[in-house]
Amino acid sequence: MERTVTVVPEDGLHARPATTFVEAAGNFDATITVEAVDGSRPPVAADSILGVTGLGVRRGDEVRLTAEGPEAEPALEALANVISTPAGESDVAGDTPA
């Protein structure tokens, strides 16, 4: 599964938004990658703080999320929520009931 999302948090995928994103990615039984749509860097594991912050993604940039596994769909939904919501306003991803 794949989804393209525009980054909304003011800090992009750095600092607190990146931490929230990485923590959310670790809550799912899925292999998840994230990459800048512009193709400037290869995809990285969504649960790697160094990989995610190393993408250099800023507010307004588009990212491509790819997930495979039993929880791919809810993982993409939760991560898209983190990226498309201003910092501090998203629900804690992965806390949806099964």
Image (tube, rainbow, N blue to C red):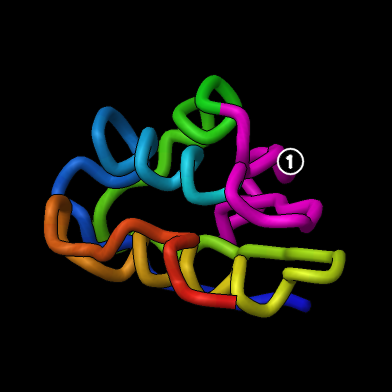
Q: How far across and down, in percent of the image, does residue 26 sit?
A: 61, 43
Question: Which residue in the rendered view is the most extreme toward the right?
Answer: 69
- Nearer to the camera, 30 or 4: 30
Quadrant housing residue 17: top left
Q: Is residue 18 left or right of residue 98?
A: left
Please tell me whether residue 42 is drawn above or below residue 65 in the rendered image.
Answer: above
- Nearer to the camera, 44 or 21: 21
* Residue matched to label 1: 42
Disc 1 crowd rating (10 Å Cα; few below 14, some 14-19, many 20+) is few
Rendered residue at 66%/39% (across/down): 41
Q: Amino acid at mark 1?
A: Pro
- Nearer to the camera, 77 or 70: 70
Which quadrant of the figure contains the C terminus?
A: bottom right
Q: Would you say residue 34 sits in the magenta stretch?
A: yes
Q: Would you say residue 36 sits in the magenta stretch?
A: yes
Rendered residue at 27%/64% (across/down): 91
Q: Is residue 88 left or right of residue 76?
A: left
Quadrant housing residue 95: bottom left
Q: How far across and down, in percent of the image, does residue 12 sit?
A: 28, 46
Quadrant housing residue 20: top left
Secondary structure of the residue carrying tag 1 is: loop
- Nearer to the camera, 16 or 42: 16
Question: Which residue in the rendered view is the most extreme toward the top?
Answer: 50
Q: How far across and down, in percent of the image, does residue 53 sit?
A: 45, 29
Please tell me whether residue 70 is drawn above or below residue 48 in the rendered image.
Answer: below
Magenta-highlighted residues: 26-48
Rendered residue at 43%/34% (across/down): 56
- The kind of secondary structure the magenta stretch mainly shows is loop
Q: How far across and down, in percent of the image, does residue 4 sit?
A: 55, 75
